Image (tube, grey):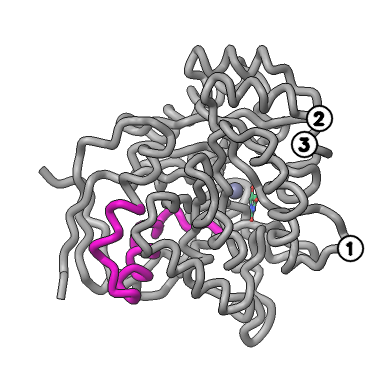
Amino acid sequence: MTDRLVIRRPDDWHVHLRDGAMLEAVAPHTARQFARAIVMPNLVPPVTTVAAANAYAGRIRKAAGPGFEPLMTCYLTDGISPDEIERGYAEAAWVAAKLYPAHATTNSAHGVTAVAKIAPALERMQKIGMKLLVHGEVTDKAVDIFDREAVFIERVLAPLLRDFPGLKTVFEHITTKDAADFVTAGPATLAATITPHHLAIDRNAIFEGGIRPHLYCLPIAKRAIHRTALRKAAVSGSRKFFLGTDTAPHAVQTKEAACGCAGIFNAPVALESYLRVFDEEGALDRFEAFASENGPDFYGLPRNEGRIALARAKATAPERVKATPGDVVCYLGGQDLGWRYEGAVA
Ligand code: DOR
Ligand code: ZN
């Protein structure tokens, strides 16, 4: 049995770091485990300009401390300027742009109402090699919340890939067998991130013994067959799947509310929570590629040089992280993770 794993230092290809006091509270947790992270732009107001991205990157660096590199993203809005997108890419202010369907999730009110509205931006991104990151859910209220990802593939993603065949696209935080199959069968320009929670829970967990607001996120967890398919994809060895936690902190009072926010905060236990799954699947040997190689390879960025270690050990996940305007409840809080993150090794 493998009791200690030493791997290339990983990156997190999907995080929400927020801003202000919340950023200061959560950023060190991501920086503790990851060299780089793709930072989502769904702030209020959203990050739509080069100036805003540069200023935000500066605040993240300060909050995270030395040795952490935020990889910024641009929030796509209807009619966003292709010139601004290209300038930010050329100046390395951002590496990708995020498509939020308008009203799909937290702070997505300024998102895209129809792909046609961002066609000039997508054309430009395709030309310059800039990546597109997609929140893959339709917002049509007539579509059942558990079907929104599968319907998105058919209505939006498949046509988009057909119209922009050279555009490198990441289908973010996939939650269904439909998505895993679609990515597996798709072109080399298509990849996907998978969160630790979607690998671990199915929709029953959200209602176990009562409503569990801290397991509510978007896209929402689906039936068990989907979780099984995601696990299979993650450990398959396919280079198209990689680590993206979607860590999404919200103050406890905004989660435990009559209308609670969507998001699971997993940054303090990110690697351990993934490793548990790979261990259960008998696939510890596949973890390094998922966590540390497939992401940079897809983005065309160098792999990290350093190495980190994880050891099989009793390790209790923290219950909460102190934050303002309220503490943030941690994913798996109070549970034994079975693995301990040991940090950098020579
Ligand atoms: O659960 C989620 N939380 N899903 C998202 O897409 C956004 C995120 C957030 O920003 O809180
Ligand atoms: Zn997200």
SS state under label 2: helix
Q: CA distance from mark 2 to mark 1?
A: 23 Å
Position of 284 relative to 8 (above/below): below
In depth, the one of 59 and 71 nearer the eye is 71
Q: Which mark is residue 115?
A: 3
Q: Is 310 positioned to the left or the right of 187 in the image?
A: left
Q: Are marks 2 and 3 in contact (CB under 8 Å)?
A: yes
Residue 7: % across, % down: 21, 51
Q: Is 99 positioned to the left or the right of 299 in the image?
A: right
Q: Which mark is residue 142?
A: 1
Most distant residue in the bottom direction: 209
Amino acid type, residue under disc 1 in the picture: Ala
Q: Can you identify the residue that label 2 sits on?
A: 117
**At 62% from the left edge and 64% from the top edge, which residue is drawn?**
178
Quadrant of residue 204 within the rendered picture: bottom right
SS state under label 3: helix
Amino acid type, residue under disc 2 in the picture: Lys
Amino acid type, residue under disc 3 in the picture: Val
Q: Quadrant of the N terminus?
A: bottom left
Going from N to C along the chain, the mark reached first, 2 or 1, is: 2
Residue 327: % across, % down: 56, 55
Q: Indicate yes or no: mark 3 CB to ligand 1 under 8 Å.
A: no
**At 69% from the left edge and 35% from the top edge, which residue is drawn?**
163
Circle 3 or circle 1, nearest the eye: 3
Most distant residue in the right direction: 142
Position of 210 relative to 173 (above/below): below
Which segment is the magenta one?
264-290
Position of 198 relative to 126 (above/below): below
In depth, the one of 221 and 60 nearer the eye is 221
**At 44% from the left edge and 33% from the top edge, which residue is drawn?**
63
